[in-house]
């Protein structure tokens, strides 16, 4: 049977090609849109691979370059294949014979072939630009206030965290001054869970009111093997409501400088070093801790109005690992492919703002650097101030 590539695209979904992936997690084919474990790599910390639009589109939140439709999915399954091989495979999966010619096809002139090629190239570039400049919309149901049991549980966590012994123990564990722990608690950003594990607030910024609203809680716990894990409440399993990975924020979002790092621990360490927990901070800045692989997109979508209005100077402080290279370096899926813009590149192009960065050269992240005892608060603040004012 003759089937065109366009007809194959129309009929196939990710469910039809799921078994082609290596699937190291043994993830079953999803039956509906949602977030699952990746079929291409080990997901050690939880699901980070989303499927949407009726199983037509996927996105790997651990790698912004890996997203698209059925074609892109099969291309990831067979990275060494040519476009012709990929097309043949999709036509076969759609029930067609790739060797059968279209009985109604008419020979095209060289001029027609050239015009079609130029049109296809222009469409590819337009789609690429749209993908780089576009912001993912956050569904309204992901920004709902925390359910009453979760909100009440966090109130109790803040009460438990007011205990001086708990604060001293956590300060010793982190290598922080106790004032930093007390500051997080007094700001309502960190509490102590039922097993006295740290719990951080997940809050949305209400742009019209200029106020914060609690959406959920991000807490640390240990599994049966003693490994430290992180989870959100509310979640679909326990609360029938999900929590989006909004960044952890300290300081005023109306500050002229925004420092963006990875994770809430690093954010708290940076905020402490610049004197944020004192009455007279050394640098007027908001500090954002990006949560999880999808957090960069969530940050840009949620704070887009402020980024466009305030136009703060952005200072990125990513971890010193391969995954963090996507913050400052454009990447290509393969030689000849159009680049996927870095976090810094997108901030510059979408919001027309200044973006600089600092690197943790000798340590994995700011926390490790601080814990090693070789990072002084005054020298760090001086360097950060210099970077934020650089022309």
Image (spheres, rainbow, N blue to C red):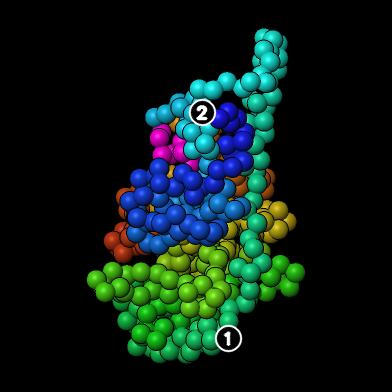
Q: Is residue 66 left or right of residue 41?
A: right
Q: Is residue 374 left or right of residue 15?
A: left
Query: Is label 1 in a helix, a strand or a loop?
Result: helix
In three-dimensional space, the C-alpha distance between marks 2 and 1, rounded to whole angstroms, equals 57 Å
Query: Is label 2 in a helix, a strand or a loop?
Result: loop
Looking at the image, which is closer to me, 37 or 2? Answer: 2
Which quadrant of the view contains residue 254? bottom right
Magenta residue span: 72-79
Residue at 50% from the left image edge and 58% from the top image edge: 31
Residue that label 1 marks: 148
Q: Which mark is residue 97?
A: 2
Percent of width and height locating residue 156: 48, 89
Q: Quadrant of the C terminus?
A: top right
- By secondary structure, the bulk of the magenta-drawn segment is best described as helix
Residue at 43% from the left image edge and 39% from the top image edge: 76
Looking at the image, which is closer to me, 175 or 34? Answer: 34
Q: Quadrant of the N terminus?
A: top right
Q: Is residue 281 visible?
A: no
- Say if mark 2 contacts mark 1, CB within 8 Å: no
Percent of width and height locating residue 338: 55, 31
The disc, 2 or 1, on the residue closer to the chain's N-terminal end is 2
Looking at the image, which is closer to me, 378 or 193? Answer: 193
From the viewer's perspective, is residue 132 above or below residue 29? above
Q: Which mark is residue 222?
A: none
Percent of width and height locating residue 122: 67, 27
Which of labels 2 and 1 is toward the front? 2
Which quadrant of the view contains residue 375? bottom left
Q: Is residue 181 visible?
A: yes
- Mark 2 surroundings within 10 Å by alpha-carbon count, few (fewer than 14), some (14 through 19), many (20 or more): some
């Amino acid at each position: 049977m003759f089937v065109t590539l366009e007809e194959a695209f129309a009929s196939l979904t990710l469910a039809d090609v799921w078994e082609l992936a290596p699937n190291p997690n043994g993830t079953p084919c999803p039956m509906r849109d949602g977030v699952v474990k990746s079929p291409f790599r080990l997901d050690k910390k939880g699901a980070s691979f989303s499927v949407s639009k009726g199983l037509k589109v996927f996105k790997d939140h651990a790698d912004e370059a890996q997203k698209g439709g059925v074609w892109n999915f099969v291309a990831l399954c067979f990275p060494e294949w040519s476009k012709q091989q990929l097309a043949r495979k999709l036509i076969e999966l759609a029930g067609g014979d790739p060797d059968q010619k279209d009985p109604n096809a008419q020979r095209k002139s060289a001029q027609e072939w050239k015009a079609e090629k130029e049109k296809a190239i222009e469409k590819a570039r337009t789609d690429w630009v749209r993908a780089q400049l576009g912001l993912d919309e956050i569904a309204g149901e992901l920004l709902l206030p925390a359910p009453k049991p979760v909100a009440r549980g966090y109130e109790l966590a803040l009460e438990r965290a007011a205990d001086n012994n708990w604060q001293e123990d956590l300060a010793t564990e982190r290598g922080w001054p106790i004032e930093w722990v007390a500051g997080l608690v007094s700001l309502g950003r960190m509490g102590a869970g039922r097993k006295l594990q740290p719990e951080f607030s997940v809050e949305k910024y209400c742009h019209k009111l200029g106020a914060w609203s609690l959406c959920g809680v991000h807490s640390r716990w240990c599994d049966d093997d003693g490994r430290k894990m992180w989870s959100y409440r509310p979640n679909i399993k326990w609360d029938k409501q999900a929590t989006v990975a909004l960044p952890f924020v300290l300081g005023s979002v109306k500050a002229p400088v925004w420092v963006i790092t990875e994770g809430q621990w690093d954010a708290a360490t940076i905020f402490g070093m610049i004197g944020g927990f004192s009455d007279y901070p050394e640098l007027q800045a908001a500090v954002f801790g990006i949560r999880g692989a999808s957090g960069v997109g969530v940050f840009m979508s949620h704070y887009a109005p402020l980024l466009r209005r305030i136009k703060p100077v952005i200072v990125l402080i990513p971890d010193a690992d391969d995954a963090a290279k996507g913050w400052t370096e454009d990447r290509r899926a393969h030689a000849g492919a159009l680049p996927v813009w870095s976090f810094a590149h997108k901030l510059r192009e979408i919001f027309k703002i200044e973006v600089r960065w600092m690197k943790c050269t000798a340590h994995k992240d700011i926390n490790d650097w601080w814990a090693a005892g070789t990072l002084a608060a005054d020298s760090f603040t001086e360097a950060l101030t210099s970077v934020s004012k650089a022309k």
